[in-house]
Image (cartoon, rainbow, N blue to C red):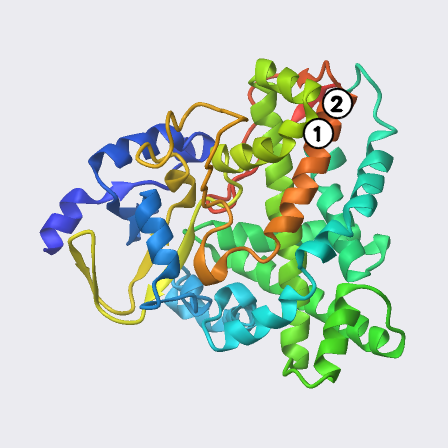
Amino acid sequence: MSQLIAKNKKVLFSDEILQDPYPTYARLHEEGPLHYVEVAGKWAVWSIFSHAECSSIAKDTRLSAKRAQQMLLPLPLSRQAEFGELARMLSLWLIFMDPPEHTRLRKLLNKGFSAGAVEALRPKAEAIVDKMLKPLKHGSEVELMSEFANPMPVRIISELLGVPEAMHGTFVNASRAIAVFRGNPNRTVEEARAAQDALIELTNFFRKTVAERRRNKGNDLISLLIDIEEEGEVLTEEELYAQCVALLFAGHETTRNLIGNGMYTLLQNPQQTAELRENSDLIRSAVEELLRFESPVQFTARVLKEDIELCGQYIPKGWSILCMLGAANRDPRQFKEPNRLDLKRLNNQHLAFSAGLHFCIGAQLARLEGQIAILNLVQHFPKMRLAGPRPEWASTFGFRGLKSLPVVL
C-alpha cells in the first residue's frame, strides 16, 4: 500500500502549476478522480478532482470542516505552539465549523445575506463603481488590480459592515496576509506570523466597533447581528468578532479575484467581450462562466471523522482531503468543452462557491459585485486591452488571483 502510494504520488503545487494549472488538471482527469498529491516534498494529501466526487464530498457528513488546527501541520513541529491563537481565531469562522454550531451561526448570518438584503445593496454598489471609474481616462495605462479590483470589494463589504473608509488600506493588507497563509499548502512560519498578526489586528478593530455600535446602532450588518443577539439568539462576543473578520476577508479576497480573473479572461476573448458589451442581459450567465473558467477559490479541504472508502481507496480517520474546485470546474464529464469560454453556457453547475452546508454565504453578494463591476468596465472602456507581457499570478494556490493586471483603457 505505502509503496503504491509513493509510486503514484503527484506533484501539484509548483510554480508552473501556479501560472497555469489547467493542462495538469486535464491530464489528471484522464487518469482518475482521486490522486495522492505531494506538497513541497514534505508531505502529501489525497485530492479529489472530479466534479461529481467534489460535490459529494462537500455534502458528506463523515467529513469535517473543523480543520483550523490542521492548517498548522506544515509548520515545524517546534514552532506550531506559537500559533495557537491563529488556529483558535480561525476555528471561530463559520467555514471551519460543523453542525450544530455551524447551523446556529449560519441561521443568524443568513438574515444579513438574504436575497432582499443583497439586492438592496445594488444602488450603493453601482454608485461606488461609478465613482471609482470616473477618474480613469480612456487611453491611459492603469494597473487594474490596485486601482479597482482590490479596493472595490473592500468598499462594498465596509459599507455592509458600516466601517470607515480610513480602514480600507488596512483591510486590504490584512486580507492578503490571511490569504497567503490559507492559500498555500506549504505554509511558512513567516506567513503564519503575518496571518496571526492580521487576525489579531482585525479582531481588536471589530471589538471596538461592536462596542461603539451597541451605543449607536445603524443599518449595518453588525447592528443587525447585535439586534439578533438581543432577541435571544446565542451569539458570543468572540463569535461576533470572528464572523465580522471572516466576512471582511471573504468579501474582499474572492471578489477581487473574480473581478481580476474575469477581466483578464475577457480581454483574452475579445469577440465574446464585444457580445457582452452589446447585450448586457448576458452578464448573469457571463459571471457564472467566469467563476467556472477561472475559479477564485481553487480548493477546499475536509478532515475525515471516520475511516472511509473513496473511489476505491481506503483512507483512515484523521486524514485530510482536498476538493480541487478549480479542477472540478473543468471536468469534461460535467461540462462540454470545459476549456472553452462560453458566456452563454447553460446549466452551469460550477462549484466556485463550494456546495452543501458550506456553500458560500456571500455568493449572492459576490455575484452582484462581479456583475456590476465587470459590466461597467466592459461598457465604459470598449477599447481596453492588456498592456505588456502576460501578467503574473499571485503565489496563493488556494485563492487564484493576479498580482497585477496592467491594461490600456
Q: Which residue is mark 1?
A: 375
User: Residue 268 appears at what percent x and percent y?
Assistant: 56, 18
User: Which quadrant of the rendered structure holds the N terminus?
Assistant: bottom left
| Image quadrant in which the C terminus is located | top right
Outermost residue, bottom side: 232
The residue carrying mark 2 is 379
User: In terms of image quadrants, where is residue 264?
Assistant: top right
Q: Bin the neighbour count of mark 2 within 10 Å (Cα to Cα): few under 14, some 14-19, many 20 and up.
A: some
**What amino acid type is highlighted by mark number 2?**
Gln
Secondary structure category for the residue under label 2: helix
| Residue at figure coordinates x 72%, y 36% from the top left | 372
Q: Is residue 403 visible?
A: no
Q: Nearer the viewer, residue 7 or 280?
A: 280
Look at label 1 and name its amino acid.
Leu
Element at label 1: helix
Tag of residue 186: none
Find residue 170 and report its horizontal and vertical position in percent: 75, 54
Answer left or right for 260 relative to 38.
right
Where is residue 303, by image quadrant?
bottom left
> Do residues under tags 1 and 2 come within 8 Å of each other at their CB atoms?
yes
